[in-house]
Image (cartoon, rainbow, N blue to C red):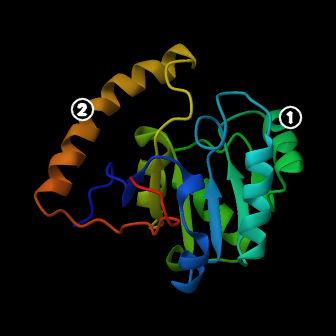
Amino acid sequence: MKHYLYPDDYISSIYDADFTALAKEGYRGVIFDIDNTLVPHNAPADERAKAFFSYLKENGFSSLLLSNNKEPRVKSFKEDAGATAYIYKANKPSTAGYKRAMEILGTTPETTLFVGDQIFTDIWGANRAGIRTIMVRPVLKWKEEIQIIAKRCLEAFVLLGYKVYVLTGGAVKKVPLKKGMQK
């Protein structure tokens, strides 16, 4: 049985993932959280993010930004980074936004990946929508709004449970990493 609060895998950075290998596994769409997943909280798309979205396109991926933030933030990041689409005020962890994202991308739970940095909004919602989840370490932790910092304290306990789960043989779907990258 899947534990809805545990990601399918937990890696340092999404920039380390090998999307060429993930494409060979049949994945075609990626849904991303923005803040502290791709860039620091409220930061614009940087050169690394722009190159990353080009890399995704080169590997046949469509991408969607799924954010609880307001439209100006999400739309400008999408346009600057080169993502395929976006949904703002997504009301994560509700599964509705994740399902709508797959409709827009033309993918299914079996061909979609979700990437985020928070358990109680990102991972919990995507898991309940049936999507393979990849959790990343926050780009810049503790430089966030107070409610996010409070959630991070609770997440620490869940992540401890996840580490025990993995160490005791819990089912994880390891993300292929680019050569030279380690978790």
- The residue lying at 57 percent from left, 20 percent from top is 144
- The residue lying at 29 percent from left, 65 percent from top is 172
Q: Nearer the viewer, residue 181 or 70?
A: 181
**Element assignment for label 1:** helix
Which badge, 1 or 2, comes first in the chain's sequence? 1
In this rendering, which labeled residue sits more in front, label 1 or label 2?
Answer: 2
**If the image is split into quadrants, where does the N terminus sit?**
bottom left
Q: Nearer the viewer, residue 155 or 51?
A: 51
Q: Position of residue 10 (x, y in %)?
A: 39, 52
**Element assignment for label 2:** helix
Residue 157 image label: 2
Vertical order, 76 against 50 (above or below): above
Q: Position of residue 121 (x, y in %)?
A: 48, 41
Q: Position of residue 125 (x, y in %)?
A: 47, 51
- Residue 108: tell me if it is visible: no
Corner quadrant of residue 46: top right
Q: Nearer the viewer, residue 139 or 159?
A: 139
> How far apart are labels 1 and 2 at the CA level?
34 Å
Task: Look at label 2 and name its amino acid.
Answer: Phe
- Residue 112: tell me if it is visible: yes
Residue 72 image label: 1
Q: Position of residue 94 (x, y in %)?
A: 52, 48
Vertical order, 143 against 136 (above or below): above
